Amino acid sequence: MSKVMLITGASRGIGAATARLAAAAGYALCLNFRQRRDAAEQLLKELRSHGAHAIAIEADIADESQVVRLFGAIDAEFGRLDALVNNAGILERQMRLHDMDKARLERVFAVNVFGSFLCAREAVKRMSTRYGGTGGAIVNVSSIAAKLGSPNEYIDYAAAKGAIDSMTLGLAKEVAAEGIRVNAVRPGVIYTEIHASGGEPDRIERIRSSVPMGRGGEALEVAQAILWLVSDKASYTSGALLDVSGGR
Ligand code: NAD
């Protein structure tokens, strides 16, 4: 049977690019989406037309009961889980800490941190040899913002991604003996729709001179790193934070 991968926030951007590569590599897929049903169903149709076994499940990963339902749908359809790509994330409008209210901080941490923790928890329950699983791989999509800090733009997002990095390091050690590898990719500036929610769709053009390679990255270039980390080619790699940032 094919290995099964869950990708959160899979309807567009880095998640959709990862889904296309994973399907081509023979994975069966659960595509999680939150609001973009049309985009998720279009991607599902595309993957199925190439012969992939795939389902699309709506769930807000910041909501614990919806996460439990999401993993229940995977149990029902596939009866196993081999890879989790914790990709879903949000970025709010650029501002200084001075102007950030608590509701914003809660939203940013609820999706980027708590959502990733909840999905990792449910994945470990299914993958761990301790609980009858056969092992697996988790890739968290962090950001180089975690090490740059993103001053004057979104230090909340940067701090949330820092929490993801720490979770990656700790969980990798916690579940290593249970057959599970845990790694993170830290993208730099990648051409996706997320920059529009930050309030500056053309942000990459403004900061591209600060990227040593002199350009923004493509979603496919991040997806390739994710696919390598989940694959057996990375069989001795765990607890790694892999920058995919053009050298930034
Ligand atoms: P994107 O906005 O296109 O994709 C994010 C996806 O997450 C969307 O499909 C969105 O619907 C989904 N999502 C958001 N909240 C959700 C929730 N509560 N439940 C389920 N799904 C939810 O942007 P992207 O660039 O493809 O982002 C993917 C990941 O890459 C994010 O974690 C982001 O922080 C990270 N990242 C992106 C960049 C970049 O420059 N694009 C850089 C560093 C890190």
Image (cartoon, rainbow, N blue to C red):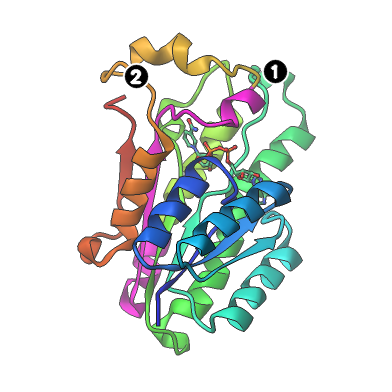
Q: Is 110 drawn above or below residue 202 in the view shown?
A: below
Q: Earlier in the sequence, mark 2 or mark 1?
A: 1
Image check: 85 left or right of 21?
Answer: right
- Spatial CA span between label 2 and label 1: 31 Å
Is residue 149 covered in magenta?
Answer: no
Q: Secondary structure at mark 2?
A: loop
Q: Position of residue 185 (x, y in %)?
A: 38, 45
Residue drawn at (54%, 84%), measured in percent from left and top? 79
- Which stretch is magenta? 169-198
Amino acid residing under circle 2:
Arg
Image check: 95 left or right of 179?
Answer: right
Q: Which residue is mark 2?
A: 215
Specify few, some or many for label 2: CA neighbours under 10 Å numbering under 14, 14-19, or 20 or more. some
Disc number for residue 74: none
Q: Position of residue 226 (x, y in %)?
A: 36, 51
The quadrant of the image that shows the C terminus is: top left
Q: Which residue is mark 1?
A: 98
The quadrant of the image that shows the N terminus is: bottom left
